[in-house]
């Protein structure tokens, strides 16, 4: 039998399952905690100004030895341990990042090899802060179609590599970290239909100043006011659509876990969604800052570790960022 025929037979053996679910989540937070006060001298700002506008009190910055590979591997290993799935049984690794400076070989391939998923397909996905939700949808669809059985989804960022430390418009927002989730087939829906959109009319609202190799050192620049308005006006309706697609009443939702961009955005979206009094709202941004594609899995890990949510609860995940991109889906917590 040829290699192609063997691969086809393997796919047939896996078979379409109809549903997928999350079995475990894990995260990695860099060692160095950076409070607002430490940044104020550089940015000519104040602790009160930063916290009032963003809700952020502190964040984590990666040290030289805490590379994207190191953080992604650590988060993935924790997710695998939580899930009970052996790395050798992972068929697919999808890694979301907007801060990977080494484009080739793909970061997902390096991480898959390091954790022991030596026979898995592995690919990088770039959708900025919406990346984890997009990657989760890709992995879920692969499992439902039968082209994969177990998938590892990772969001990993070293935003400090692409944000200029003296940029008063963004340096206090962004931080580093990695989070991951393991997916498997399920008899009941565990990852709901994804609602996703992109709006190129706002493409310049969050961008790099120049291409790599163009002479000048590129940095990320952000128009925070435009993104704030877009997030409140466009993302909240998309999140509500994801709830309807999953047939979940917002009053009965277990947890709301949006991208941890800004506490004011999180609170306004939660208000507009009409969530119930018992719905837990993730506020990880207060202590970790904006970790882009890593923010949602890190927030999920915290909620589960603190016992604020339980296995079987529903959670609405909403990622949004550069592009401008958004993706949302309801998941059942492991």
Image (cartoon, helix red, strand yellow):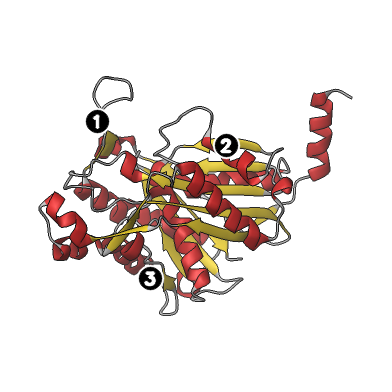
Q: Which residue corresponds to mark 3?
A: 274
83 vs 94: above or below: below
Secondary structure of the residue carrying numbered label 1: loop
What label does residue 209 carry, if any? 1
- Residues at discs 1 and 2 in contact (Cβ within 8 Å): no
State how far apart marks 3 and 1 are (Cα): 38 Å
State how far apart marks 1 and 2 are (Cα): 28 Å
The answer to which of marks 3 and 2 sits earlier in the sequence is 2
Q: Nearer the viewer, mark 1 or mark 2?
A: 2
Numbered disc total: 3
Image spot of residue 133 (x, y percent): 49, 50
Image spot of residue 4 (x, y percent): 79, 25
- Among all residues in the image, which is located at the extreme bottom? 277
Image spot of residue 15 (x, y percent): 79, 44
Between 169 and 29, the one nearer to me in the picture? 29
Q: Is residue 195 something one can see in this rendering?
A: no
Q: Which residue is located at x 52 percent, y 70 percent?
A: 304
């Amino acid at each position: 039998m040829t290699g192609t025929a063997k691969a086809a037979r393997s796919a047939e053996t896996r078979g379409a399952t109809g549903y997928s679910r999350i079995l475990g989540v894990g995260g990695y937070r860099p060692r160095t905690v950076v409070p607002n006060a430490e940044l104020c001298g550089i940015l000519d700002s104040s602790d009160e100004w930063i916290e009032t506008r963003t809700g952020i009190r502190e964040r984590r910055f990666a040290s030289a030895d805490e590379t994207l590979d190191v953080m992604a591997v650590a988060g993935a290993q924790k997710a695998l341990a939580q899930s009970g799935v052996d790395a050798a049984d992972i068929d697919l690794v999808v890694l979301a990042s907007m801060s990977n400076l080494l484009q080739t070989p793909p970061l997902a391939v390096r991480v898959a090899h390091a954790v022991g998923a030596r026979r898995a397909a592995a690919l990088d996905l770039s959708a900025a802060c919406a990346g984890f939700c997009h990657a989760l949808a890709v992995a879920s669809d692969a499992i439902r179609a039968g082209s994969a059985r177990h998938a590892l989804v990772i969001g990993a960022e070293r935003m400090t590599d692409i944000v200029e430390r003296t940029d008063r418009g963004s340096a206090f927002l962004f931080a580093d970290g990695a989070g991951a989730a393991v997916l498997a087939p399920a008899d009941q829906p565990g990852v709901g239909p994804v609602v996703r959109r992109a709006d190129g009319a706002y493409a310049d609202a969050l961008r790099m100043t120049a291409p790599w190799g163009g002479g000048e050192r590129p940095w990320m620049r952000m128009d925070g006011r435009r993104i704030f308005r877009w997030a409140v006006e466009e993302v909240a309706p998309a999140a509500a659509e994801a709830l309807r697609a999953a047939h979940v009443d917002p009053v009965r939702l277990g947890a709301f876990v949006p991208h941890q961009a800004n506490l004011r955005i999180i609170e306004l979206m939660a208000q507009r969604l009409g969530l119930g009094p018992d719905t837990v709202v993730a506020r990880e941004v207060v202590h970790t800052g904006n970790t882009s594609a890593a923010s949602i899995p890190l927030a999920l890990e915290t909620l589960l570790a603190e016992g604020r949510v339980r296995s079987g609860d529903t959670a609405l995940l909403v990622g949004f960022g550069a592009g401008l991109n958004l993706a949302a889906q309801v998941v059942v917590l492991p």
